[in-house]
Amino acid sequence: MAIDKIKRTVKNRQVKGAAEEALQLAAENLGLTSEQLEDRLVTTLGFDKNGTMQLSYGERSFLIKVNGDLQVVVVNEETGKSVKSLPSPAQKDDAELAAQSKARFTQLKKDLKTMVNIQAQRLEESLSKQRLWSADEWTALFVQNVIMQKFAVGLIWGTYEDGQLVTTFRYMEDGTFNTVDEDEYELPSGSLVGLIHPLELDQSTLEGWKTQLEDYEIKQPFEQLNRQIHVPEDEDKNKVEYDRLPESDFSPTAFPKALEKYGWIKGPAQDGGWYHEFYKEYGNLVAELRFSGTSISYYEGLEDITLESLHFFKPGSQKHYYYSDHKSIALGEIAGRVFSETIYDILRASGR
């Protein structure tokens, strides 16, 4: 967990790279993928199976829980109402215990905020790349972890066969599963589960899920059902290069940072430490965005960048595929989710 935190928070490229390599080695030694290892590193922050904990002031103790908005709150056990902070210690309270509890509460809020940001980012990337969990893996992460339950409730899930959507469902607050028609659903034990993309749904099903979330007053942790959809124009389907990129000038620091947040990686540094590509990996497909170039390590006095081209290719067996030329694939042959998410990332990073 400490190494995972370094990978996500330290800006130094060498340190970040070393942390990534260490995690990859750990995953291989455990016979896991990097994503599976990251799932196992998701903590409950010390909350019990009911999503609660007690913090003591000595004679008085307080029930702490994570609410549906993924915030730490104090619950009045008599009224059921919650407040956002612990009360000030009274004269009869143990001053040392009260101070420890208040410090723990403050740290819990910070840790939960960090965790929510990381997991929302991971889950959105899972949607983008169509990551699939086995039913057992999904249950371990989203049912048995009381914090990840909050994410599961706010998202729409699907079962998949050969990468194609079979059924859609939602995990309910009471631990049951629900269909779009609000019928009870049982998750098949051998199924593969992933986050649905609105491209996969007909209009009736999409609107049905939107209505259900509105009726239950549930806010999604990130845009899923209202996600922007992009498809290639008919005249572009035979092209191997997408030429409708935003034509503005962009910040050489803000634009790369935004793309990295959405799961893209920088290309290798060339002469003078400059790089000219970003890549996003979609399993057996890679998107390459070429741009005018900027420094991989220096940030002062850099000129704005412009976007040049976007294309897709199969990486083959090469680990460092970016050192070779590859045959680009026609845009019409790119899976709908991959094409849509790639364009969506670029437009979001560019402020469009």
Image: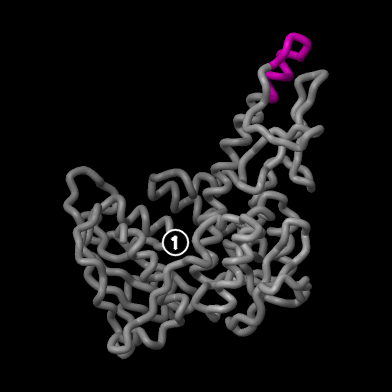
Where does residue 206 sit, x and y in percent of width and height?
Answer: 56, 74
Residue at image position (73%, 63%) is: 139
| Residue 228 sits in quarter | bottom left
| Residue 318 sits in quarter | bottom left
Q: In this view, does 83 lie above or below 127?
A: above
Secondary element under disc 1, as helix, strand or loop, is loop
For label 1, count other residues whose C-alpha is less than 10 Å away and answer few (under 14), some (14-19) or many (20+): some
Left or right, 142 with respect to 259, comes to right
Q: Is residue 304 above or below residue 51?
A: below
Q: Name the foreground residue: 321 vs 256.
A: 256
Kind of residue at badge 1: Gly
Where does residue 290 sit, x and y in percent of width and height?
Answer: 27, 69
Magenta highlight range: 89-101
Residue at image position (55%, 60%) is: 123
Where does residue 232 sit, x and y in percent of width and height?
Answer: 35, 82
Q: Name the foreground residue: 5 vs 32.
A: 5
- Residue 28 appears anywhere in the view: no
Residue at image position (39%, 67%) is: 344
Residue 90 among those drawn in magenta:
yes
Question: How are the residues colored?
Answer: one colour
Residue 106 among those drawn in magenta:
no
Left or right, 308 with respect to 2, comes to left
Residue at image position (32%, 88%) is: 234
Left or right, 230 with respect to 159, comes to left
Question: Which part of the image, by quadrant, shows the C terminus?
Answer: bottom left
Where does residue 167 sit, x and y in percent of width and height?
Answer: 66, 79
Q: Mark 1 points at which residue?
A: 263
- Residue 203 appears anywhere in the view: yes
Q: Is residue 86 above or below residue 309?
A: above
- Looking at the image, the residue that sits furthest to the top is 91
